[in-house]
Image (tube, coloured by chain):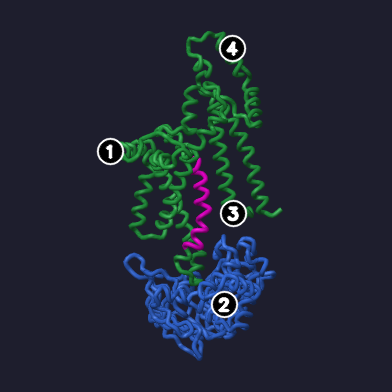
Chain colours: A blue, B green
């Protein structure tokens, strides 16, 4: 079956001063139709750059190499016109903060209808009817009467539903959700995640869910890709990842969850800092912060695939000494 | 009542206190200027008895508060008073002069909007050379004083080229073509700085809108740059531009005083300047009040238009 999204050795480099800084470095990943894959990592690890590369939204000065295939079609190297035809149609995006991602002056309904009309020959009235139906589908009560409201009359959760409705308008094969719940209340978060899951079930849309929140991953993802300093360090089924994390970084991340810490104990932290993008170490990028570090880590680890899973570490599955000097 | 109707009502009611405060200012400020209208009228050989008699007849011997109440009372009955020098009713004078000032400012603002706004949009989305050219025009247009520009335009078009009259006026109703020929240089003088200012405002507003996060989202929907600019950025920049246009009408009305003087246009501005020199209190009061009332009216219309363009404003949600 053709993957909804297939990344092969994707590299994204930005010109900074005289040199190039690499924000995404050799990422390969597949998202199958109907699958929800979580892309997890700290801020600045390259998650959002990866999303922008898939959407073809990076500035022209950026160097993108490798391959990005959306439903089998190559995206890297497409001209502007073809990229526009793809965006919002075969791949669409839900962004972080619905209060700043909607045009504040346009009515919410028109913003949904606009996406339809950008890609299909549909009359004004028909687009309005389709948009109203989409708004109902994403759980907006009395959608017809909210159609003409500007965004500020809707709550944050309702606005995010509008963004999702617009993203789904043309039945894309892939939905990229970049921190879709970060700006929302916890109760609303659960509703939005439930909605994404239901839409996947109903429509078979593949979802790449970008987040720094492992709780979100646990709620909806089938598989998880963990990203660190521009590279994927581990890919595994969601359950498997939580039960048996293999890469030391993943294990440290899970160890740093507040729920993993006993009451009264200090929260665990990962010592050290993410390496500067401009001065990446030649070997394993996590080595400086890794408790399992040995001399072999001076060389880049060869990803070790196990079925559909992967962990890029020389010391996969070795027992971990206690983390966090604070304890 | 809908929130929109409440917004309109609130905004209309708000003009009343503004108009009142303005009437107090107009009344007091002209009386602060040294000089006496009666002595100016009668000449310095007039006897003290004569002066006192005329002062009494014009009610200038009454306390200020009483004079003010009399003036406002007449105003509320639609009576603007009489010119101290010509004894003619001021409503007649204004009926003749107001159209001149209105034509001058309206034509200037229309020209400035028609040129400045499209150029501002182009400059916001254009390349390096468009930016440099517009930057140059903005700096020149804003820094050149209008009286100097007016003189230069007269020297060029009326002096050297002799294609346009240097000064004078004919009503539009008498001879439309001549009227426009007389208006061309004054309008150019008044509109140049305005065009530069609106260009800069529009460019700034467009640039700031184009940097907002929702523009990325619009691109992600697959919209073309042209649609993003025309359909979204322009609409979002419009309230800012309209607000500035409203404020600039006030600036134009002030500039009209200089330009009317320069080109001998018989407008309200010229009437005020002459009246100030004669300490002609009622005429100054009526002229300034009418100009100020027009500005208040324009501000009201501006706010209503902005409220209509941006639903956040009429909802009181804050933009």
Spatial CA distance of label 3 from label 1 is 48 Å
Spatial CA distance of label 3 from label 2 is 52 Å
In front: mark 2 or mark 1?
A: 1
Residue A255: image quadrant is: bottom right
For label 3, the residue is B308
Around disc 2, counting alpha carbons within 10 Å, would you say few (fewer than 14), some (14 to 19), or many (20 or more)?
A: some
In front: mark 1 or mark 4?
A: 1
- Mark 4 and mark 2 in contact (Cβ < 8 Å)? no
**Residue visible at 63% across and 64% down in the picture:** A148
Q: Position of residue A286 (x, y in %)?
A: 45, 76
The residue furthest right is B1
For label 2, the residue is A254
> Same chain, marks 4 and 3?
yes
> Same chain, marks 3 and 1?
yes
* Residue B160, numbered circle: 1
For label 4, the residue is B53
Over which residues does the magenta segment extend? Answer: B229-251
> In the rendered structure, does residue B244 fall within the stretch colored magenta?
yes
Q: Position of residue A242 (x, y in %)?
A: 58, 82
Label 4, secondary structure: give it: helix
Determine whether A73 is above or below B85 in the image: below
């Amino acid at each position: 079956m053709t993957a909804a999204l297939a990344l092969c050795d994707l590299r994204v480099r930005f010109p900074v001063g005289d040199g190039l800084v690499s924000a995404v470095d050799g990422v390969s990943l597949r998202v199958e139709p109907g699958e929800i894959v979580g892309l997890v990592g700290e801020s600045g690890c390259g998650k959002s750059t990866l999303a922008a590369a898939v959407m073809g939204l990076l500035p022209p000065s950026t160097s993108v190499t490798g391959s990005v295939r959306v439903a089998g079609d190559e995206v890297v190297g497409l001209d502007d016109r073809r990229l526009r035809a793809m965006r919002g149609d075969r791949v669409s995006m839900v962004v972080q903060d619905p209060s700043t991602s909607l045009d504040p002056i346009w009515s919410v309904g028109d913003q949904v209808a606009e996406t339809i009309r950008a890609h299909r020959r549909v009359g004004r009235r028909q687009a309005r009817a389709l948009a109203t139906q989409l708004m109902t589908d994403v759980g907006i009560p009395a959608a017809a009467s909210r159609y003409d409201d500007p965004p500020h009359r809707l709550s944050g959760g309702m606005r995010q539903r509008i963004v999702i409705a617009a993203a789904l308008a043309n039945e894309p094969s892939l939905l990229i959700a970049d921190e879709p719940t970060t700006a929302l209340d916890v109760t609303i978060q659960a509703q939005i995640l439930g909605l994404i899951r239901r839409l996947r079930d109903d429509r078979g849309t593949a979802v790449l869910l970008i987040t720094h929140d492992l709780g979100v991953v646990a709620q909806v993802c089938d598989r998880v890709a963990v990203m660190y300093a521009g590279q994927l360090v581990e890919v595994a089924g969601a359950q498997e990842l939580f039960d048996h994390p293999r890469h030391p970084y993943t294990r440290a991340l899970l160890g740093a969850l507040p729920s993993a810490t006993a009451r009264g104990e200090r929260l665990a932290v990962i010592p050290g800092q993410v390496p500067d993008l401009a001065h990446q170490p030649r070997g394993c990028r996590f080595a400086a912060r890794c408790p399992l570090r040995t001399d072999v880590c001076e060389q880049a680890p060869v990803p070790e695939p196990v079925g559909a899973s992967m962990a890029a570490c020389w010391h996969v599955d070795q027992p971990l000494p206690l983390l966090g000097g604070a304890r | 009542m809908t929130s929109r109707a409440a917004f309109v009502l609130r905004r209309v009611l708000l003009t009343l206190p503004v108009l009142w405060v303005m009437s107090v200012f107009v009344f007091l400020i002209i009386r602060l200027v040294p000089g006496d209208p009666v002595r100016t009228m009668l000449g310095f050989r007039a006897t003290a008895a004569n002066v006192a008699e005329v002062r009494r007849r014009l009610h200038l011997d009454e306390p200020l508060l009483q004079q003010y109440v009399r003036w406002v009372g007449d105003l509320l009955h639609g009576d603007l008073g009489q010119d101290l020098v010509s004894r003619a009713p001021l409503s007649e004078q204004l009926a003749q002069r107001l159209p001149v000032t209105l034509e001058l400012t309206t034509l200037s603002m229309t020209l400035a909007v028609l040129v400045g706004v499209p150029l501002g949009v182009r400059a916001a989305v254009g390349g390096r050379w468009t930016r440099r050219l517009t930057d140059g025009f903005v700096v020149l247009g804003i820094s050149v004083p209008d009286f100097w520009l007016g003189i230069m335009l007269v020297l060029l078009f009326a002096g050297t080229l002799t294609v346009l009259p240097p000064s004078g006026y004919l009503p539009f109703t008498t001879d439309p073509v001549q009227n426009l020929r007389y208006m061309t240089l004054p309008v150019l003088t008044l509109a140049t700085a305005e065009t530069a200012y609106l260009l800069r405002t529009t460019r700034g507003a467009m640039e700031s809108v184009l940097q907002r996060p929702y523009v990325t989202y619009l691109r992600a929907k697959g919209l073309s740059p042209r649609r993003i600019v025309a359909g979204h950025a322009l609409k979002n920049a419009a309230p800012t531009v309209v607000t500035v246009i409203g404020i600039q009408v006030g600036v134009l009305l002030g500039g009209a005083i200089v330009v009317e003087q320069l080109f001998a246009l018989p407008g309200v501005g010229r009437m005020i300047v002459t009246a100030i020199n004669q300490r002609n209190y009622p005429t100054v009061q009526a002229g300034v009040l009418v100009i100020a009332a027009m500005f208040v009216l324009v501000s009201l219309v501006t706010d209503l238009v902005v409220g209509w363009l941006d639903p956040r404003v009429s909802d009181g949600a804050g933009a």
